[in-house]
Image: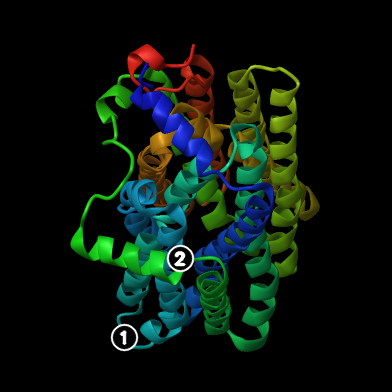
Amino acid sequence: MQPSPDETRRDAAEDTQWSRPECQVWTGTLLLGTCLLYCARVSMPVCAASMSQDFGWNKKEAGVVLSSFFWGYCLTQVVGGHLGDRIGGEKVILLSASAWGFITVATPLLAHLGSAHLAFMTFSRILTGLLQGVYFPALTSLLSQKVRESERAFTYSTVGAGSQFGTLVTGAVGSLLLDWYGWPSVFYFSGGLTLLWVGYVYRCLLSERDLILALGILAQGLPVSRHTKVPWRQLFRKPSVWAAIVSQLSAACSFFILLSWLPTFFKETFPSSKGWVFNVVPWLVAIPASLLSGLLSDHLINQGYRTITVRKFMQVMGLGLSSVFALCLGHTSSFCNSVVFASASIGLQTFNHSGISVNIQDLAPSCAGFLFGVANTAGALAGVVGVCLGGYLIETTGSWTSVFNLVAAISSLGLCTFLVFGKAQRVDLSPAHEDL
């Protein structure tokens, strides 16, 4: 009896999974890559207040520059996931990192090309967003194909911890560089480290032949995937897919709003406080929180708890409890309390790595990059609106409470949708072979 196409696909996927030593090396490498991704991304929010003083930007103009990253970011999500599914996520990541590293290093030069500072910085952020937009969909595709299901939550949460670690590094080192050498040094630092990482991956982990082949494929636009076409009609008929998209949208938008505006919130609300405290402590808490969420998730599943039950619990923590602490930020005048609330909110948001981010891999491992790209596109679009709306609310109301209320409302929408409609059954197989 001939095996079905779905059985053949699953057997082929198992044959290409990383061995444990390979998984450890790649997990560490991708952790560092995610760290550098956020070093480059967070450089602008860290420098926004200083750049606003130098160039005379008001809150709305600063909001345009900060949100313009997402204009580009949302355009390449699906492309990045689809390319990751076809040519390999590691190749997509390497090519994009080499480009965004160069753009980050060149950002101070662009800022001083002429008098149109706002236009040049907006262009730089859009371009950075375009290049970084492929990263997480390609990463999701890579891990869904290379990592065992029982180890995905910890692997993804470990790699995802790089986002907090990168923000921490830029917050700590960037704050010092900002005080000592001015804001251009922050961009030189993050972009330069990215280019060094690219060199390491190229020399030590990737085959030159495979990379050249991937470049040739991209140049010719040839479909070379071993997989069939993405069953997008089948995917989007499932309520669980839409629940995953809405939940990812909410998680991404809430995180982007806090990421973009927290430095300014602390600097304006507590002007005499040390920048390294509020730029470091929340992200220092988030790193072990992310690792803990992955360990806890895999442990609960290995103990026999249903996968979807574990995923929903992680979302209660990542969207529900985190939004409670975000609300508390708007109702305290104490610097210490604000740091505690910000740390708790950011730390709990990392539980999303072991919730909705892995749930997308549960639903469609054969096209996880594509599906994550769709979900993250929605999140990026919401991020554009959310960051701009945050700037508008601050400018018009003069109150930061409205921004934190916005974060809580968005998080609540995603949580309720996922609790009602979320599932962990595969939806990328033909109906006769879907997991029961």
Residue indicated by mark 1:
115
Q: Residue at x 67, y 41 (%)?
A: 154
Q: Position of residue 238 (x, y in %)?
A: 36, 19
The tag earlier along the polypeptide, 2 or 1, is: 2
Residue tagged 2: 94
Closest to the observer, 204 or 230: 204
Near-viewer residue (208 or 90): 208
Residue ranking furthest to the front: 1
- Residue 99 lies in what quarter of the image? bottom left
CA neighbours of label 1 inside 10 A, class few (<14), some (14 to 19), many (20+): few
Write the residue at 53% across / 73% down: 194
User: Can residue 63 be seen by looking at this rendering?
Assistant: no
Residue 359 spot, x, y in % from top left: 52, 30
Cα distance in 3D space between marks 2 and 1: 34 Å
> Of helix, strand and loop, which one carries label 1?
loop
Disc 2 element: helix
Question: Residue 155 location, x and y as percent?
Answer: 64, 45
Q: Amino acid at mark 1?
A: Ser
